[in-house]
Image (spheres, helix red, strand yellow):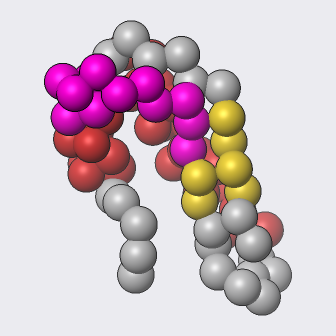
């Protein structure tokens, strides 16, 4: 496993805010060769949660990078 959990994402966004770092979006990669559409649905749903956290903290997030 790599990346950040939703809980860790919240902490990272809070830290970025404290450091006056402008976060503009989310990047994820579900893994090479993934053929299960539900995996992408879950990843996009999680990304939406992170976007919502960002908005709560005052970020204007507009970028979603779907790696792979």
Vertical arrangement, residue 10 with respect to residue 6, above or below: above
14 sits left or right of 35 in the view: left
Q: At 55% across and 29% down in the image, what residue appears?
A: 24
Q: At 33% across and 46% down in the image, what residue appears?
A: 9
8 sits left or right of 46 in the view: left
Q: At 81% across and 81% down in the image, what residue appears?
A: 35
Q: Which residues are magenta?
A: 14-26
- Residue at the extreme front: 20
Q: Is residue 38 visible?
A: no
Q: Quadrant of residue 3?
A: bottom left
Image quadrant containing the N terminus: bottom left
Is residue 22 highlighted in magenta? yes
15 sits left or right of 45 in the view: left
Q: At 36% across and 60% down in the image, what residue appears?
A: 4
Front one among 45 and 58: 58
The location of residue 57, given as percent across then percent down, is 32, 17
21 sits left or right of 68 in the view: left
Vertical arrangement, residue 1 with respect to residue 26, above or below: below
Q: Is residue 21 visible?
A: yes
The location of residue 40, given as percent across then percent down, is 70, 62
The location of residue 66, given as percent across then percent down, is 72, 56
């Amino acid at each position: 496993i790599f990346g950040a959990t939703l809980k860790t994402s919240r902490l990272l966004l809070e830290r970025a805010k404290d450091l006056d770092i402008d976060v503009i979006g989310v990047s994820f990669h579900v893994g090479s060769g993934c053929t299960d559409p539900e995996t992408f649905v879950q990843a996009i749903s999680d990304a939406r949660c992170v976007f919502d956290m960002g908005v709560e903290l005052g970020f204007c997030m507009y970028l979603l990078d779907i790696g792979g």
